[in-house]
Image: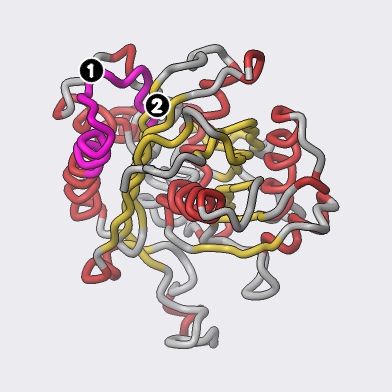
Amino acid sequence: MTNGNKRNVVIKGTGHAVPTRVLSNFDLEKMVDTSDEWIRTRTGILRRRIADEHTATSDLATEAGRLALEDGGVSPEQLDLIIVATITPDMFFPATSCLVQKNLGAWGAACYDLSAGCSGLIYGLDMAMHSITSGAYNRALIIGADCLSKITNFQDRTTCVLFGDGAGACLVEGADRAGVLASYLGADGRGWEKLLIRAGGSRHPASPATLEAGWHYIEMCGNDVFKFAVRIMVEASLKVLADAGLEPEDIDLFIPHQANIRIIESAAHRLKLKDTQVYVNVDEYGNTSAASIGIALDEAARSGRIKGGDRVLLVGFGAGLTWGAMIIEWVDKDND
């Protein structure tokens, strides 16, 4: 939907965090029947970051959130709301967002987690936008964070080459100008089996049988997800562009979910975008799920790839199946 309220939402700060350990394609060659050439040509991934045994999702989320607060010049006590989008929470409960609140000392913030797979950051930004434009809150921290290595079967060569760990954060607040121009979310639960972890919840509680079956690892129907991803990223992008009264050529930077270079290139081609309009870092991090778009957005902002007044299109897809797109008019913090 378009944001027709006078009160808008602007991104005041961004941050991201990734583990120090790098797992390259050559490392994977020693672990599973694959090759650097096969991974590069089919996914565009060269390396990914892997969390150690002592690092959980809340740790990466906290660091990304702290950097976003510093970038926006806001103290933790000034936050009204913390949303963490993740499919790898530290535990079923309490919410990972509560652990982040504790770590940051953001005692005045309401907290909740949401699960929308790789679309999570856009879902969180949309939820925060509506919370702020309603007048209920003024300042929110949205973090997409996942430790996918913790739920990846490193003996399954079809999935283990794809995923990495990380967190990306956005600090947003109410304003009377610029900000979110349009936002669009969607889901189709009929595709729930295309991308999932089968066990560990109330349907199939953890048991020796589920462990033996490998039901606690990511399962994915790769070809089906690929076709869905290309189609829905284009459809969602065109929908949100139309809602904002814009055309693809009006976009200064396109930041898609970083899942696979072929998906990104196919979507960009169908949207008739130039290479200079598209941000890609899948080669460095692989698919970091809900963290993906946040990491890319922070890198683009800190490198000067985005400047005040630029129109940025975010689009993602994920388990559920879910999708989301958002157009942001960037605010130059130095002139805010």
Res 27 visible:
no
Residue type beneath disc 2: Val
**Residue at x 24%, y 34% (from the top left corner):** 241
Q: Which region of the structure is painted magenta?
A: 236-255
Q: Is residue 239 magenta?
A: yes
Q: Which mark is residue 28?
A: none
In this rendering, is residue 296 above or below 154? Answer: above
In this rendering, is residue 149 above or below 36? Answer: below
Which image quadrant for residue 82? Answer: bottom right
Question: What secondary structure predominates along the stretch shown in magenta?
Answer: helix
Q: How far apart are the two marked residues, 1 and 2, measured between alpha carbons?
A: 11 Å
How packed mark 1 is, by other alpha carbons closer than 10 Å (few <14, some 14-19, many 20 or more), is: few
Residue 191 at x, y percent in the picture: 24, 66
186, 232: nearer the viewer? 186
N-terminal-most mark, 1 or 2? 1
The residue under label 2 is 312
Left or right: 52 in relation to 186: right
Secondary structure category for the residue under label 1: helix
Q: Which mark is residue 249?
A: 1
Image quarter of the C terminus: top right
**Residue at x 75%, y 39% (from the top left corner):** 66
